[in-house]
Amino acid sequence: MRMAETLERHLQRAHCDYKLVEHEPSATSLEAARKAHIPAARMAKSVILDDRRGHYLMAVLPANRKLDLDKVRKGSQRWQLSGEQNLVGLFKDCQRGAVPALGALYGLDMLIDPQLARLADVYLEAGDHENLVHMSMDDFFNLAPNAEVCELCH
């Protein structure tokens, strides 16, 4: 697998300029950044949250940072880390644990940390454990126009 079909289709439709970056197999976004020889601060990590009632939210932060759940505010809902078993149905064209940090393409609301939002470009999982997508932040936000920028990290 090289790229999730949903991601590839939206990149093409939006005429995004991107580069596919191959790397040795990795288990985490932080490891993918290391194996691709890119700064972890430029690697967008997706963290999927749920409210125990079937609503999902994607928090996007630098791979070298940790999510602070107390900072996640989206209405009055209380969010928790979503279990891996819940993600299979949401991201059918992605390998387990390799979710692209563009939840909007999958119908999820998104929060993005300002440390990423300020960058000129970003890397994200392509839907497998051996490829990243490198794109401008302008193109990223074109694909996720309703993403809310807010502090998410410790």
Image (cartoon, helix red, strand yellow):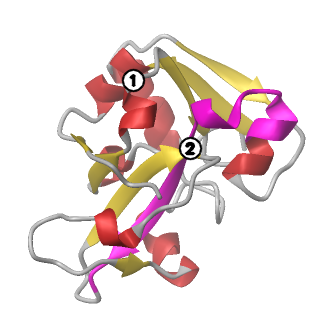
Of 64 and 101, nearer the camera is 64
Q: Which residues are magenta?
A: 33-51
Q: Is residue 150 left or right of residue 18?
A: left
* Residue 98 sits in quarter: bottom right
For disc 2, the marked residue is: 4
Q: Is residue 104 magenta?
A: no
Judged from this view, the residue extending furthest toward the front is 154
What residue do we see at 17% from left, 64% from top? Answer: 74
Judged from this view, the residue extending furthest toward the left is 75
Asked whether the viewer can see residue 129, the reply is no
For disc 1, the marked residue is: 118
Identify which amino acid the numbered label 1 is placed on: Arg
Looking at the image, tell me whether mark 2 or mark 1 is earlier in sequence order: 2
Q: Is residue 43 left or right of residue 149?
A: right
> What percent of the width, then of the height, locates residue 1?
72, 44
Under circle 1, the secondary element is: loop
Identify which amino acid the numbered label 2 is placed on: Ala
Under circle 2, the secondary element is: loop
The answer to whether 142 is drawn above or below residue 91 in the figure is above
Numbered disc in front, either 2 or 1: 1
> What percent of the width, then of the height, locates residue 18?
54, 16
